[in-house]
Image (tube, rainbow, N blue to C red):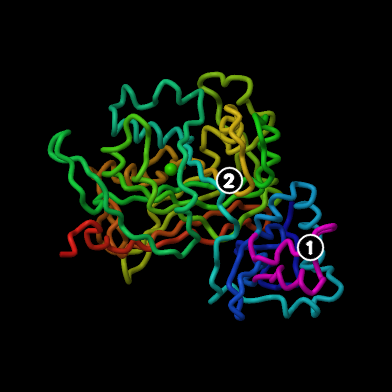
C-alpha cells in the first residue's frame, strides 16, 4: 500500500510517524486545560473531543464517546465500530476532503502539547516471549545449560504486573529503593537500586473484553492497537526476590508507554509470522496466520545535558510468541480479559550485542560496560539519564510510527523508612 495523502501537508512527508495511513489515538491537554481525545496527523493533533461535541464526527447510536478525553469507551465498542470511525477520519483528513477549512480550527500542533494516558489501564500483564532475551538472561542467572526453562518453548511465560504503575511518555521515573541480596543469603540490605535498567517491548491493548478461553484468531480480533513499552526494571531487587514466584517489586516502579495507540488496521501491511517452532506448540496456541509485525525499534540513551547515543536497534518480528498467542494463553484458565488490558510483549532482543533490548544484556550484567558517544560508560542507568524508545514500520514512501516512549531517571528519594525523630 502506498502513502495516502492528506491536506495536512506535514502528513505527506516520508519521515513523519503520522501519515494518513496511521491515524493513531492519543489524549492531550488542550489550551483550555481539558483532557481531549486526539488523532495524530503529520505534526498536528486533530481534536476529536471537540469535533464530536460540535457534531462533525461521531459514532452511530452513541453519545459523548470522546467526552472524557479517554479512548476506553471507544475501544470497548469493537472492531466494526473501529473500522467505521477510521474511515470517517480518513475522509475528513484525506486529500479529497471537500472542506478542509472547516477543520483547521480543530488542529493543534504536537510540539508543546502535553500528552496524557490515552486509555484506562484496567490490568497489566508482562510476558517473556523473546527467545534471545530469555537465553541471555537465563545464561546470566542460571548458566548456559539451564538458560531456557523447560516450559519456555511451549508456554508464553508471563506475570501479572501493576496497572497502577503504567505512565505515559515523558514521565520522570524515580530510582527505587528495595531489598537487595547481602554478602550471603541471610543478610539482605534495604538500599537504593544500583542496577536500574530498561526493557524494550511492545504493548498490545485489549479493546473488546472476553469471558472464558478465546482462540488465537479471536484474541487477534480483540486487540485494539499497539504502543511502545519500557518495562523499567531493578535488576538487583529482581535477582534477590524472583524465586519462586517471579518478579515483584523489581518491576513495580513504573512502566512507560508511548502516547499514541497505533491501530491494528495501520499495521496490517506489516504482518509477519512468528519464527519456526523448535518444538511444536499445542494446537490451541498455533497461529492461523501471521500475527507479529515488522516494526524497526531503537533505544537512545542521553546522559543529563548531553547528546543521545543509540544503544540498540532491533525488530519486533524476532519475538517467539505474538500478542494474540499470549492473550489466548492468558484466557485458558477462564481469566476474563477487559477493555484496557495491557500486555507487554517481553524484552525484544536480536541475536547481536547491538540489538539487545536491555542494558543487563548489552553490558552483560556489568561485565562488559558500553561506551557512549560522549565517552562515558554504562553498565546500568545513572541518575539523570534520559532513555527514549522509538519504532516504526516502513511502507512504500511512508512509515507508521509510535512517537517516543521516553523517561528520565531521577535520583532515589531519601530513605523512606528513616526515623523522623
Ligand atoms: Ca518485561
Q: Residue furthest front?
A: 421
Q: Is residue 205 left or right of residue 189?
A: right
Q: Is residue 53 left or right of residue 179?
A: right
Q: Residues within 10 Å of mark 1 (few under 14, many from 20)?
A: few
The numbered dot on residue 358 is none
- SS at mark 1 in the image: loop
Magenta range? 45-70
Residue for point 55% across, 30% down: 275
- Which residue in the protein does label 2 denote? 341
Q: Position of residue 372 (x, y in %)?
A: 30, 58
In the figure, residue 89 lies in which quadrant?
bottom right
Q: Is residue 89 left or right of residue 11?
A: right
Residue for point 51% across, 45% down: 124
Mark 2 CB lies closer than 8 A to ligand 1: no
Q: Residue furthest right?
A: 98
- Which residue in the protein does label 1 denote? 63
Distance (Cα) linking label 2 and label 1? 24 Å
Q: Is residue 418 left or right of residue 222?
A: left
Displayed-image quarter of ligand 1: top left
Compared with 306, 318 (above or below) is above
Q: Nearer the viewer, residue 33 or 199?
A: 33
Amino acid at each position: 500500500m502506498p502513502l495516502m495523502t492528506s491536506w495536512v501537508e506535514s502528513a505527506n512527508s516520508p519521515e513523519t510517524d503520522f501519515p494518513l495511513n496511521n491515524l493513531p489515538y492519543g489524549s492531550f491537554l488542550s489550551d483550555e486545560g481539558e483532557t481531549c481525545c486526539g488523532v495524530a496527523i503529520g505534526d498536528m493533533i486533530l481534536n476529536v473531543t471537540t469535533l464530536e461535541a460540535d457534531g462533525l464526527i461521531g459514532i452511530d447510536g452513541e453519545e459523548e464517546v470522546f467526552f472524557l478525553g479517554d479512548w476506553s469507551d471507544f475501544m470497548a465498542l469493537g472492531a466494526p465500530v473501529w473500522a467505521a470511525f477510521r474511515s470517517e477520519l480518513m475522509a475528513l483528513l484525506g486529500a479529497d476532503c471537500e472542506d478542509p477549512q472547516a477543520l483547521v480550527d480543530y488542529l493543534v500542533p504536537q510540539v508543546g502539547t502535553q500528552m496524557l494516558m490515552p486509555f484506562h489501564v484496567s490490568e497489566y500483564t508482562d510476558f517473556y516471549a523473546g527467545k534471545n532475551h530469555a537465553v541471555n538472561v537465563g545464561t546470566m542467572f542460571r548458566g548456559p545449560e539451564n538458560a531456557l526453562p523447560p516450559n519456555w518453548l511451549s508456554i508464553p511465560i508471563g506475570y501479572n504486573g501493576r496497572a497502577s504503575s503504567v505512565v505515559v511518555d515523558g514521565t520522570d521515573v524515580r530510582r527505587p529503593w528495595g531489598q537487595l541480596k547481602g554478602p550471603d543469603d541471610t543478610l539482605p540490605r534495604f538500599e537504593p537500586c544500583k542496577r536500574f535498567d530498561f526493557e524494550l517491548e511492545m504493548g498490545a491493548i485489549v479493546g473488546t473484553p472476553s469471558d472464558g478461553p478465546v482462540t488465537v484468531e479471536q484474541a487477534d480480533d480483540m486487540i485494539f492497537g499497539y504502543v511502545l513499552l519500557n518495562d523499567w526494571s531493578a535488576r538487583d531487587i529482581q535477582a534477590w526476590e524472583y524465586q519462586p514466584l517471579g518478579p515483584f517489586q523489581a518491576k513495580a516502579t513504573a512502566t512507560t508507554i508511548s502516547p499514541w495507540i497505533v491501530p491494528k488496521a495501520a499495521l496490517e501491511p506489516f504482518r509477519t509470522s512468528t519464527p519456526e517452532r523448535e518444538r511444536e506448540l499445542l494446537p490451541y496456541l498455533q497461529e492461523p496466520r501471521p500475527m507479529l509485525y515488522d516494526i524497526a525499534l531503537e533505544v537512545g540513551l542521553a546522559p543529563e545535558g548531553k547528546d543521545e547515543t543509540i544503544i540498540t536497534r532491533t525488530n519486533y518480528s524476532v519475538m517467539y510468541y505474538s500478542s494474540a498467542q499470549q492473550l489466548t494463553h492468558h484466557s485458558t484458565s477462564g481469566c476474563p480479559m477487559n477493555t484496557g488490558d495491557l500486555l507487554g510483549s517481553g524484552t525484544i532482543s536480536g541475536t547481536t550485542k547491538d540489538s539487545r533490548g536491555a542494558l543487563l544484556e548489552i553490558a552483560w550484567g556489568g561485565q562488559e560496560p558500553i561506551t557512549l558517544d560522549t565517552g562515558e560508560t554504562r553498565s546500568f542507568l545513572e541518575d539523570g539519564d534520559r532513555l527514549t524508545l522509538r519504532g516504526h514500520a516502513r511502507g512504500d514512501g511512508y512509515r507508521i510510527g509510535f512517537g517516543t516512549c521516553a523517561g528520565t531517571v531521577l535520583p532515589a528519594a531519601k530513605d523512606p523508612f528513616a526515623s523522623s525523630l
